[in-house]
Image: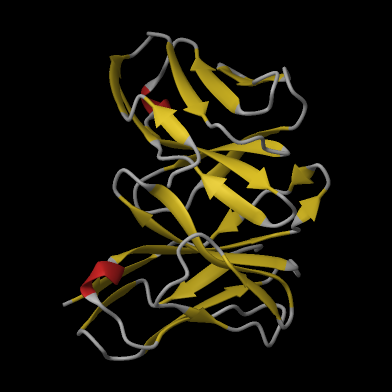
C-alpha cells in the first residue's frame, strides 16, 4: 500500500506555464520533504516542511504543507526547461521510516 | 567531496546467484537506508540503519539482507535473487531524525540490477 500518492503522474507543459503537483496521504507525517531526481542520478533535496500550514519558497518554487500535515503541494511559476525531472515527496513517520510518494515526471518544453 | 558511493552501477545476473551491492558514505552519517525504484511506485524503503549494528525493515524487505558493521558501509545482500528484484537501487545516508525534522538524505548514483 502506497501511503503517499502524487498527482499528476506525468506533466508536459510549455516553458513559462505554471503548474502544481500534489502529494496526498491519509497518514500524518512529522515532516515532509520534496526531492528532484534527474535521469541517471539519485534524488536531491529541494525543501523540508515541518509545521502544518507552512509555506516555503525556493526561487520560482513554492511548497506548502497541509494544516493537518497529511498533504503537501509544490507550485512552480513560469516553468523553465531546467525544471524538467522527477519530483518526489517524502514523509517521515515515527523516528526512522521514510515513505516516498509515487513521483511526478515533469517535462518542460522550450 | 561529501558523497555516497555504490558499486556496481550496473549488474546483470541470473536467478539464485547471490550478490552484494556495496554502499559507502564519507559524511559520518549515522542513518543509512536502501531503496528500490520502480516505474510508477516512486522509491520504496527496503532496510534502514540508525547506527552500527542497528538495522530494521522498511516497507519491502523480503528477499534482502543488510549489515552495518562499520558506520560508513551498508551493503545490500540478495541471497537468492529473483526476476521480481529487477530494479534500480539507491543507497542513502543522513544525519537521521532530529525531531520533528527528518534530515536531508544524500543519495548514491544508483545500481541498476537485472535478474534473468
Residue lying at 66% horizontally and 35% vertically, measured from the top left: A28
Image quarter where the C terminus of chain A lies is top left
Residue lying at 35% horizontally and 24% vertically, measured from the top left: A8
Residue lying at 51% horizontally and 45% vertically, measured from the top left: A100
For residue A63, above or below residue B2: above
Toward the viewer: A93 or A40?
A: A93
Residue lying at 62% horizontally and 37% vertically, measured from the top left: A33
Q: Position of residue A35 (x, y in %)?
A: 53, 39
Does the rendering let one see residue A109? no
Side of B51 where A97 appears, left or right: left
Toward the viewer: A46 or A81?
A: A46
Side of B82 where A81 appears, left or right: right
Toward the viewer: B9 or A63?
A: A63
Q: Quadrant of residue A82?
A: top left
Q: Position of residue B84 (x, y in %)?
A: 25, 68
For residue A105, above or below residue B59: above
Q: Position of residue A96 (x, y in %)?
A: 70, 57
Furthest residue in direction left, as rendered: B116
For residue B90, above or below residue A85: below
Does the rendering let one see residue B44? yes
Q: Quadrant of residue A14?
A: top left
Task: Count the marks.
Answer: 0
Q: Quadrant of residue A49?
A: top right
Q: Which coloring applies here?
A: secondary structure
Q: Position of residue B16 (x, y in %)?
A: 26, 89
Amino acid at each position: 500500500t502506497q501511503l503517499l500518492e502524487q498527482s499528476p503522474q506525468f506533466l508536459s507543459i510549455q516553458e513559462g506555464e505554471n503548474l502544481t503537483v500534489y502529494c496526498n496521504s491519509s497518514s500524518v507525517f512529522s515532516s515532509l520533504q520534496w526531492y528532484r531526481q534527474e535521469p541517471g542520478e539519485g534524488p536531491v533535496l529541494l525543501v523540508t516542511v515541518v509545521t502544518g500550514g507552512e509555506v516555503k519558497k525556493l526561487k520560482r518554487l513554492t511548497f506548502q504543507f497541509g494544516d493537518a500535515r497529511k498533504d503537501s503541494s509544490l507550485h512552480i511559476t513560469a516553468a523553465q526547461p531546467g525544471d524538467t525531472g522527477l519530483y518526489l515527496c517524502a514523509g517521515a513517520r515515527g523516528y526512522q521510516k521514510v515513505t516516498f510518494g509515487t513521483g511526478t515526471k515533469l517535462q518542460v518544453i522550450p | 567531496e561529501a558523497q555516497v558511493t555504490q558499486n556496481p552501477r550496473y549488474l546483470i545476473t541470473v536467478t539464485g546467484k547471490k550478490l552484494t551491492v556495496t554502499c559507502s558514505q564519507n559524511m559520518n552519517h549515522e542513518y543509512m537506508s536502501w531503496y528500490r525504484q520502480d516505474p510508477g511506485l516512486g522509491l520504496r524503503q527496503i532496510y534502514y540503519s540508525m547506527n552500527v549494528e542497528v538495522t530494521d525493515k522498511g516497507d519491502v524487505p523480503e528477499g534482502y539482507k543488510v549489515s552495518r558493521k562499520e558506520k560508513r558501509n551498508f551493503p545490500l545482500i540478495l541471497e537468492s535473487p529473483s526476476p521480481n528484484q529487477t530494479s534500480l537501487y539507491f543507497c542513502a545516508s543522513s544525519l537521521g531524525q532530529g525531531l520533528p525534522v527528518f534530515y536531508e538524505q544524500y543519495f548514491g548514483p544508483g545500481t541498476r540490477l537485472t535478474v534473468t
